[in-house]
Amino acid sequence: MSPEWAILNGLVEPLQYAFMQRSLAVAILVGIICSVVGSYLMVQRLALLGDAISHSVLPGLAIAFWLGVNIFVGAFIAGVMSTVLIAWIHRRSPIKEDAAMGIVFSAFFALGITLITTIQKDTKIDLNHFLFGNILGVTLGDVRDTAIIAALVLLTVALLYKELLFYSFDPLGAQASGLPVGLLNSGLMVLIALTVVASMKVVGVILVLSLLIAPGATAYLLVPRLHQVMCLGAAIGVCSSVSGLYLSYYFNLPSGPAIVLVVSAWFALAFLFSPRHGVLTNPGRGVSLWPRWLGWGR
């Protein structure tokens, strides 16, 4: 067998299984929307918010599972509640937003772990895949729900691209020009919550931040404009999700961590070899690894 035929056979073989077909469909959808929404998080320096929402959905999906309703609905409600609570604490107290995020997401996460532990005692069902993902176990219903979420997210971004772009880079200017910055901020929080919910089955609530930030950050090192970051980030996200899925299939690895390792490897390559920002290709642009107050470095 020629090497080309062996590679083609290796790519096609997993597709004979229905669970791999479903997994690939979800991986592609999640890779796209995580990169698109994560680009806004990156340019606004709100990576911690993505982490806060991803941890905060846990009690919602646990309660939804216990009640026998769609876990996507419960997770989305919990995610939106966490963003509202963060904004309320920040607005009604001298507590900074990053501190409010830390308080809310740790409390929600602890509540979710407690609920999951309690449910496991009663039902004897392992719910740990909510934490680390289980893309190989997605159902047709999961594919349908993910496709609906992806369509809503991408349609919203397409319709509000200019407004979100202006708000992301210059919120004060956007407010002065008459844009409804409050609604734009709330809409962005909803998009983040929807994206986190869609990604739960792929990488779990603990690792979802990597898919939200790493593809966009990798693209940011390679291209200058936001729409280019989104497009290239989506390509990196899809490639990482699909590659991680194949690694999981052939090497019996956990699917979520495998995907995160692949996307992290892409970032490492861009960080080292980016034509404009690479540490090795542009060593003069780098920052010294040693703190100046120790007397080392430049």
Image (cartoon, rainbow, N blue to C red):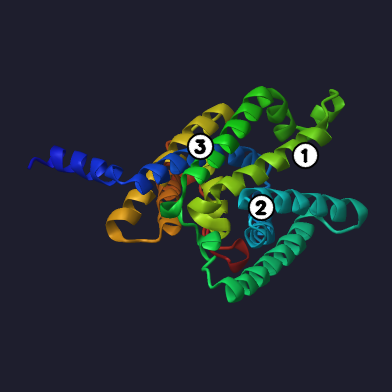
The residue lying toward the viewer, choosing from 17 and 158, is 17
- Residue 249 in percent (x, y) is at 31, 54
Q: Which sits earlier in the primary sequence, circle 1 or circle 3?
A: 3
Q: CA distance from mark 1 to mark 3?
A: 21 Å
- Residue 195 in percent (x, y) is at 60, 43
Horizontal side of 167 relative to 117 (left or right) equals: right
Q: Which residue is mark 3?
A: 32
Is residue 271 shown above or below 294?
Answer: above
Circle 1 crowding by C-alpha within 10 Å: few under 14, some 14–19, many from 20: some
Horizontal side of 25 relative to 197 (left or right) equals: left
Quick check: can you spot residue 4?
yes
Q: Quick one: which residue is furthest to the left in this view?
A: 1
Q: Which sits earlier in the primary sequence, circle 1 or circle 2?
A: 2
The residue lying toward the viewer, choosing from 287 and 32, is 32
Q: Residue at x 73, y 62 (%)?
A: 102
Q: Which residue is mark 2?
A: 75
Q: Which residue is mark 1?
A: 186
